[in-house]
Amino acid sequence: MDPKFVKQLEEFGVIPVIKIDRAEDAVPLATALRDGGLNCAEVTFRTAAAPDAIRAISKAYPDMLIIAGTVLTTTQADEAMAAGAKCIVAPGLNPAVVQYCIDKGYPVLPGVCTPSEVELGLSLGLTHLKFFPAEAAGGVGMIKAMAAPYTAVRFMPTGGVNIKNVADYLNCKAVFCCGGSWMVPADKIAAGEFEEIKNMTAQAVTLVKEIRSK
């Protein structure tokens, strides 16, 4: 993966993982994230609105780092990139989908949670991987255990990362950023409470700065 892209993710520290049911909520949500200090988002393909949401955000804010998450097929990967996504993220590591993304030149972060999956990622030329589901799969302790023999690999933990444990993850040298949804709860998106989302995002940004200043 392009070092400049990795550096961008690392600078953000936390990537908001969002599930959008209505494409019309995409731009107001993106605005709230930007106003809160995070010019990035992972839009998950858990709903049919994902491609249109990515397209709307990319059109409104071309400089925003939009990642397509929960991408399970090559068709979804193509849809995501055509809509304006800048990276493909998956919960697991499907070699066929990952190789397709590599061949197409799509930055890709597949999910892993075992040493065998890490080795599969390495065999495909990947040194940056998503660690999912982070808390359920052993959290920071598991990341440190896997990072010991795989010194070239760095992880983006997602799944159960929240305001209470994000410091533990970001203080781990093997972690380059985290994916989290606590600042973008689905119920607040559905209710149009974008001012609250902006405030929660600002709190997350402040927290990341505090963690990194220690």
Image (cartoon, grey):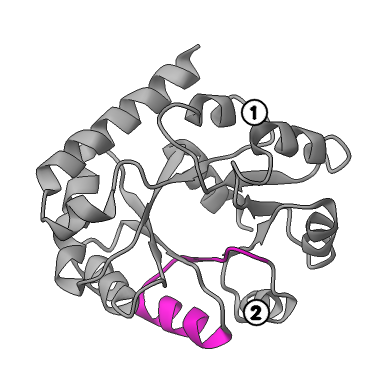
- Residue drawn 56% across and 48% down? 6
Amino acid bearing label 1: Cys
Please report the bounds of the magenta region as a residue range: 74-92
Residue under label 1: 172
Residue 44 is situated, as x and y percent measured from the top left of the image, at 41, 66
Q: Are marks 2 and 1 in contact (CB under 8 Å)?
A: no
In the rendered image, the quadrant that contains the N terminus is bottom right
Residue 159 is situated, as x and y percent measured from the top left of the image, at 52, 48
Q: Is residue 210 above or below residue 152?
A: above
Q: Nearer the viewer, residue 132 or 204?
A: 132
Question: Could you say whether the residue bearing mark 2 is in a helix, strand or loop?
Answer: helix
Res. 97 mark: 2
Residue 104 is situated, as x and y percent measured from the top left of the image, at 60, 81
Is residue 53 toward the left or the right of residue 109 in the image? Answer: left
Amino acid bearing label 2: Val
Q: Earlier in the sequence, mark 2 or mark 1?
A: 2
Res. 188 mark: none
Q: Is residue 20 above or below residue 132?
A: below
Quarter of image, res 81: bottom left
Residue 47 is situated, as x and y percent measured from the top left of the image, at 35, 74
- For label 2, the crowd category at 10 Å Cα-Cα, with few meaning under 14, some 14 to 19 and many 20 or more, is many
Quarter of image, res 98: bottom right
Label 2, label 1: how many angstroms apart (C-alpha)?
A: 29 Å
Can residue 80 be found in the magenta stretch? yes
Can residue 173 be found in the magenta stretch? no
